[in-house]
Amino acid sequence: MTVEITRVAGAAIAPYLDALADLRMRIFRAFPYLYEGTAAYEREYLASYAGSPASVVVVALDGARVVGASTGLPLVRHSDDVVPPLARAGFDPETVYYFGESVLEPAYRGHGIGARFFVEREAAARGHGFRTAAFCAVDRPADHPRRPADYQPPGALWRRAGFVRRPDIVGEMVWRDVGAAADTGKPMVFWLKELA
């Protein structure tokens, strides 16, 4: 398997946004997100990445095809749902770099690409002088009826990358689950790493 990993920032992100939107909608349909995305929402959400010179998208390419991507940007440039939980926990939002999604087609998993996504995003965060990296992940119950029997939570990868789960810092994001009639709020637990 030959996959090229490239890091793009600011306006250079724009050519990858459609592929990233498509990956997000496909990959996040699976457990645990069960996300019923729309192209319109994806365009609006991802525009913030192309609009910030301190943002980053790490792209995994198999030839010309985008098979994975991972994002990051200053926390204060992200939507308002991720800033308050960290501010309440005593973090200065101006010093936090937020790691957005990491999405990778299943056939490409288990080859170190996810670990490389962390390395590249941390390099971007440090390059812009940020002291803390953070992300949050949906917290579904262990007995969720749509949890596949073979589901492996990604926490081990995140811990190997040096992140610490902070169950005391929880936010909420709202989206429509696949097959649901309405949007509902989901608890999002934060993971943090000090970069200094």
Image: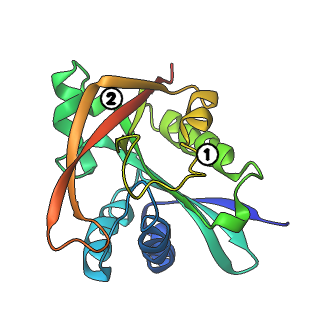
Position above or below: 126 against 66: above
Residue 191 on image: x %, y %: 41, 31
24 vs 156, nearest the viewer: 156
Amino acid type, mark 1: Glu
Residue 185 on image: x %, y %: 17, 52
Q: Is residue 131 visible?
A: no
Query: Around disc 1, counting alpha carbons within 10 Å, would you say few (fewer than 14), some (14 to 19), or many (20 or more)?
Result: some
What residue appears at the point 64 percent right and 29 percent down from the top-left corner? 160
* The N terminus sits in image quarter: bottom right
Position above or below: 99 against 23: above
Residue named by callout 1: 120
Amino acid type, mark 2: Thr
Whether residue 81 sits left or right of residue 38 in the image: it is left
> First in sequence: mark 2 or mark 1?
2
The image quadrant of residue 92 is top left
90 vs 149, nearest the viewer: 149
**Mark 2 to mark 1 CA distance (whole Å):** 18 Å
Local secondary structure at mark 2? helix
Q: Is residue 32 visible?
A: yes
Residue named by callout 2: 95
* The residue positioned farthest toward the right in the image shown: 1
The image quadrant of residue 180 is bottom left
